[in-house]
Image (cartoon, rainbow, N blue to C red):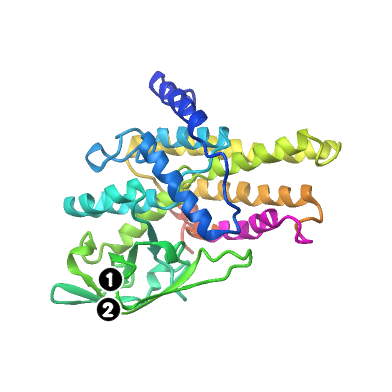
């Protein structure tokens, strides 16, 4: 395939570069200050929206620009090249559930505030005992007249303590086979009966949480799709969530590599040629990821939605996102372990989760084996 920009893509890239030169924030809060960092991310979200750089692939009636998915790849490349903060994380792939399955009324209600950064969202999928085997979830939503009553527990819910809304999977048919009795609801996080308990992670972060639902009343018109559509909605959401272009992996990774390269150029890591070798290898992983993302985005142009081949993107992303913090740790020497470089240590510890969230590496290999290569399950 041809990886060069079309004239229209080249114009888009140039316009974005020009905008970034004038709009990249000059100071960021420490990652240790979660509240300040969330506020910073929200402001960056709103600034990107005001510039017209979010919702690139959303249809125009939903507030987007109706562009090809390839533009998402260009967007993330340029954020990384400019050493800019990455785009906000999960709103893009959660919006795909509403765009693909929601009603016109639901799209009109939820998408504009999501796109503008006026309301924040979390994803209520995983449960204790239903992580990789999501179809085993036990949270239930029982229809009672014009509303559902939700009871259950979610875990590993990212940004739950800051979210206004949750895209929730719950079992609405207790008798159906486990993949078929699941539905998707959108739930306000300040609804009575919801309790959020932050989880203290190994890197001192508390962005993840447990969420408990005790007789939570959810209007029936907040069901996304039809009863029983939850599994298909989850698979559509995961297909986008596993895409590095959707979650900004390239931009984040390139930014960190730029910082390492700049420090190495100033002699911070000594004169050993091994430093250059390590950085070059990590750049190689990034370039493989970038080209694979462009290939996958081109397939989306052809087929309309991501296919199972996206699991290969996730596996390549895992390799890059776990190699980069390993290199950072090695170059920084003893400082992270001695508490003199918390950010590097935190990035390394957090990277262990990359092979778990959005579907484990083992799940991705099974998807490739069965749905791409056609191998038998046994």
Q: Which residue is mark 1?
A: 181
53 lies above or below 109 = above
Which of the two residues, 73 or 258, is positioned nearer the viewer here?
Answer: 258
User: Residue placed farthest to the bottom in the image?
Assistant: 214
Query: Dot 2: within a 10 Å radius of its alpha carbon, few (fewer than 14), some, or many (20 or more) residues?
Result: some
Q: Main secondary structure of the magenta part?
A: helix
Q: Quadrant of residue 177?
A: bottom left
Which of the two residues, 147 or 267, is positioned nearer the viewer here?
Answer: 267
Q: Is residue 277 left or right of residue 319?
A: right
**Residue shown at 60%/35% (left/top)?**
287
Instruction: Please report whichever mark, 2 or 1, sits nearer to the chain's N-terminal start.
Output: 2
74 lies above or below 10 = below
* Pointers 2 and 1 in contact (C-beta within 8 Å): yes
Q: Is residue 373 visible?
A: no
Q: Which mark is residue 174?
A: 2
Task: Magenta stretch: give its range.
Answer: 337-356
For the residue labelled by badge 1, is the local secondary structure a helix, a strand or a loop? loop
- Pinpoint residue 264: horizontal percent, then vertical percent: 77, 37
Q: Is residue 320 left or right of residue 124?
A: right
């Amino acid at each position: 395939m041809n990886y060069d920009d079309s004239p229209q893509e080249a114009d888009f890239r140039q316009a974005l570069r020009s905008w970034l030169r004038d709009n990249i924030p000059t100071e960021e809060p420490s990652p240790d200050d979660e509240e300040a960092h969330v506020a910073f991310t929200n402001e960056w979200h709103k600034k990107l929206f005001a510039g017209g750089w979010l919702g690139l692939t959303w249809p125009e009636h939903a507030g987007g620009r109706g562009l090809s998915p390839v533009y998402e790849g260009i967007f993330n490349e340029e954020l990384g090249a400019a050493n800019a903060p990455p785009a906000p994380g999960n709103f893009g792939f959660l919006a795909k559930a509403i765009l693909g399955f929601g009603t016109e009324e639901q799209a009109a209600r939820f998408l504009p505030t999501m796109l503008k950064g006026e309301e924040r969202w979390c994803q209520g999928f995983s449960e204790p005992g239903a992580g990789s085997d999501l179809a085993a979830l036990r949270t239930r939503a029982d229809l009672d007249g014009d509303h559902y009553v939700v009871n259950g527990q979610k875990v590993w819910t990212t940004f739950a303590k800051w979210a206004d809304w949750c895209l929730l999977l719950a079992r609405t048919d207790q008798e159906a086979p486990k993949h078929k009795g699941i539905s998707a609801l959108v739930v306000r996080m300040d609804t009575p009966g919801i309790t959020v308990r932050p989880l203290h992670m190994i890197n001192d972060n508390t962005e993840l949480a447990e969420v408990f639902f005790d007789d939570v009343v959810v209007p029936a018109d907040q069901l996304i799709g039809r009863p029983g559509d939850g599994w298909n909605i989850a698979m559509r959401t995961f297909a986008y969530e596993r895409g590095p272009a959707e979650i900004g992996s390239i931009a984040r990774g390139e930014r960190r590599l730029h910082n390492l390269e700049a420090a190495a150029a100033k002699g911070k890591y000594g004169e050993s040629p091994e430093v250059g070798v390590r950085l070059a290898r990590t750049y190689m992983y990034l370039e493989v990821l970038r080209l694979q993302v462009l290939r996958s985005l081109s397939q989306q142009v052809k087929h309309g939605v991501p296919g199972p081949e996206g699991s290969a993107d996730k596996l390549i992303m895992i390799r890059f996102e776990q190699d980069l913090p390993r290199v950072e740790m090695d170059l920084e020497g003893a400082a992270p372990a001695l508490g003199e470089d918390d950010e590097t240590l935190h990035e390394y510890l957090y990277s262990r989760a990359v092979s778990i969230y959005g579907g484990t590496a083992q799940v991705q290999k099974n998807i490739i084996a069965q749905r791409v290569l056609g191998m038998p399950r046994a």
